[in-house]
Image (tube, grey):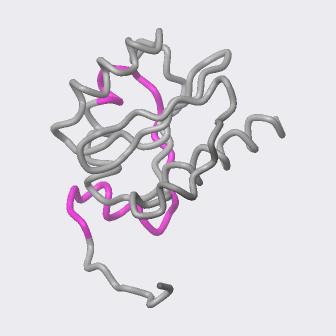
């Protein structure tokens, strides 16, 4: 269980790194972790006994995402969990469609669950961290 949690933390950290920090990304990922580049965000596939997908991209990214899963030897039905880092459409917009294709449950933090269910982004509130 600890190894799975550590892998998820590494994968979520990888997905959350913005493009302007690309040179700061780790040069290697664990052998069972695959980054899937999508137009506005990344998804991360974690392969194991049953695959886990971190983020799914936008509503129009599902076809490309399913093709990328297939390139990595995974069908939607192989997914055991769809883990969303947050509820914005560019990361969670395709979750409903992918759940329909896979049957996998969706996990998202409680603060973003309402926004994700509504299918629209809330107001962005910059925190001034940069």
Q: Nearer the viewer, residue 85 or 18?
A: 18
* Residue 127, magenta (yes or no): no
Residue found farthest to the left: 60
Count of picture labels:
0
Query: Which residue is located at x 36 percent, y 58 percent?
Result: 87
Which percent across, then down, holds residue 79? Answer: 49, 22
Which percent across, then down, holds residue 19? Answer: 39, 57
Q: Nearer the viewer, residue 13 or 117?
A: 13
* Residue 106, magenta (yes or no): yes
- Up the image or down, 50 lies above or below 3; here it is above
- Up the image or down, 66 lies above or below 107; here it is above
Residue found farthest to the bottom: 128
Residue found farthest to the right: 2
Location of residue 39 (image quadrant):
top left
Which percent across, then down, holds residue 83? Answer: 50, 43
Query: Which residue is located at x 46 percent, y 69 percent?
Result: 111
Give the left or right position of residue 72, taking residue 12 as reference.
left
Q: Nearer the viewer, residue 101 or 34?
A: 34
- Up the image or down, 12 lies above or below 96; here it is below
Query: Which residue is located at x 65 percent, y 43 percent?
Result: 8
Q: Which residues are magenta?
A: 98-121
Query: Which residue is located at x 46 percent, y 15 percent?
Result: 72
Give the left or right position of residue 42, taking residue 29 as reference.
left
Location of residue 4 (image quadrant):
top right
Location of residue 3 (image quadrant):
top right
- Up the image or down, 93 lies above or below 129; here it is above
- Quadrant location, the N terminus: top right
């Amino acid at each position: 269980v600890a190894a799975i949690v550590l892998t998820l933390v590494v994968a979520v950290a990888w997905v959350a790194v913005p493009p302007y920090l690309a040179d700061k990304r780790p040069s290697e990922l664990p052998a069972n972790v695959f980054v899937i580049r999508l137009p506005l965000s990344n998804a991360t596939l974690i392969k194991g006994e049953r695959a886990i997908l971190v983020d799914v991209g936008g509503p129009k990214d599902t076809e490309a995402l399913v093709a990328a899963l297939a390139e990595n030897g995974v069908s939607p039905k192989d997914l055991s969990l769809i883990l969303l880092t947050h509820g914005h459409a560019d990361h969670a917009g395709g979750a409903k469609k992918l759940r329909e294709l896979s049957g996998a449950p969706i996990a998202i933090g409680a603060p973003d669950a309402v926004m994700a269910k509504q299918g629209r982004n809330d107001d962005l509130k910059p925190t001034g961290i940069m």
